[in-house]
Amino acid sequence: MASITKRPDGSWRARYRDETGREHSKHFARKADGQRWLDEVTAAVVTGQYVDPGVGRVTFDRYFTEWAERQVWVPSTAQAADLVRRSVPFGDVPLMRLRTSHLEGWVKAMDSSGLAATTVASRMNTARACLKAAVRDRFIAADPSVGVRLPRRRRAEHSMRVPTPDEVGAVLALTVPYMRPVIAVAAFGGLRLGEACAVQACDVDFLRRQLKVQRQVQRRKGGGVDVRPPKYGSERTVHLPDGVLAILAHHLETYGVAEGGWLVVSPEGLPIPPTTANGWWHRTLAAAGLEGVRFHDLRHFYASGLIAAGCDVVTVQRALGHSAATTTLNTYSHLWPTAEDRTRSAAASLFIDATTPSARSDRALAEPSSTAGAPRTTKRSVP
């Protein structure tokens, strides 16, 4: 319900009631201006874009905090989201006053500080999810993050570091013997660091030569560790080579099974958290004389080996525990042979067949004669 009334001082008072029955009013010098304002409000209500002016005064920080509390997140995701909340420079800006320029300035500042493009995109995605929720809750009419350009990511083939077999062999040989199984299941089973630290003796099936990936270890905020399902629910069964099984068997024979069934534990008897294991990894790299190799690169080493052996996308996806084949392709598509590679290989085989006499002779012996079984004919001389 809306109306315009003239006040004793000659101004015009336009007012309306929203869907909750709350009255909103505004004063204008001219009646036409008041009517225009009411028309705009009516249009917003009809198109579903109406926003209560009162709720729009809530700051980004306050809304983000309340929105984050409603999300079903694992602790690590909640910690990452809280980092985003604390890092934005517009936390005290009311939602209704938040502009695209605020987010563009934030992205520029992150890029200038040297953050990786993937990190900037991840933080922006979290802020954008919050702003989309604010639109759905009708705190704001539109998402100000739409159209904000992010730093360009490097192509996977340029940013990915795939260790060589010699490098993997070096770290496997020079690591402390107690941690050798962690490298083995990562390099030859594709486990993530948290998954490799969470392996229990009961996960290894020596008869079937399999390893069940059922959990991961994460450091708990404030100390201690949390044991949770693998990232993105990627429980899976990994098929291990005999060499890795021998490493695991030797480890169990030498050190036994730790309390709780863990394969490797900290001095306190708890699963080793990824942060502690990462420190050990860097010491191993130093001993091997290597630089710039992350523990996660062992997973790339495993994936590249599967692809080089001719495994298809779905096989690699399942081995790595990706939620979708598109994730595998987006990460490793540059490692698969292209149509040009296959065409060149086929043409090379044809060239060898055509130019190598031995190849033609072998093929002639292998293929049945086209005249076999045909009646023999005698040529007659022409007088």
Image (cartoon, helix red, strand yellow):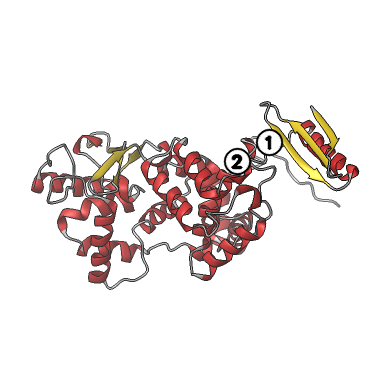
Q: Decide which of 283, 363 is in the foreground and name it.
A: 283
Q: Where, quadrant-wise, is the N terminus in this rendering? A: top right
The residue to which callout 2 is attached is: 134
How many neighbours does mark 1 have within 10 angstroms: few (below 14), some (14-19), or many (20 or more)?
few
**Precedes in sequence: disc 2 or disc 1:** 2
243 to the left or right of 320: left
Where residue 234 appears, as percent x and y from the top left, is: 40, 38
Q: Amino acid at mark 2?
A: Ala
The residue to which callout 1 is attached is: 374
How many neighbours does mark 2 have within 10 angstroms: few (below 14), some (14-19), or many (20 or more)?
many
Based on the displayed image, in which of its 4 quarters is residue 238 positioned?
Answer: top left
Can residue 362 be seen at all in this image of the molecule? Answer: no
Based on the displayed image, in which of its 4 quarters is residue 205 positioned?
Answer: top left
Q: CA distance from mark 2 to mark 1?
A: 83 Å
Q: Answer above or below: position of 216 versus 336.
A: above
Q: Nearer the viewer, mark 2 or mark 1?
A: 2
The residue at the point 83 percent across, 31 percent down is 3
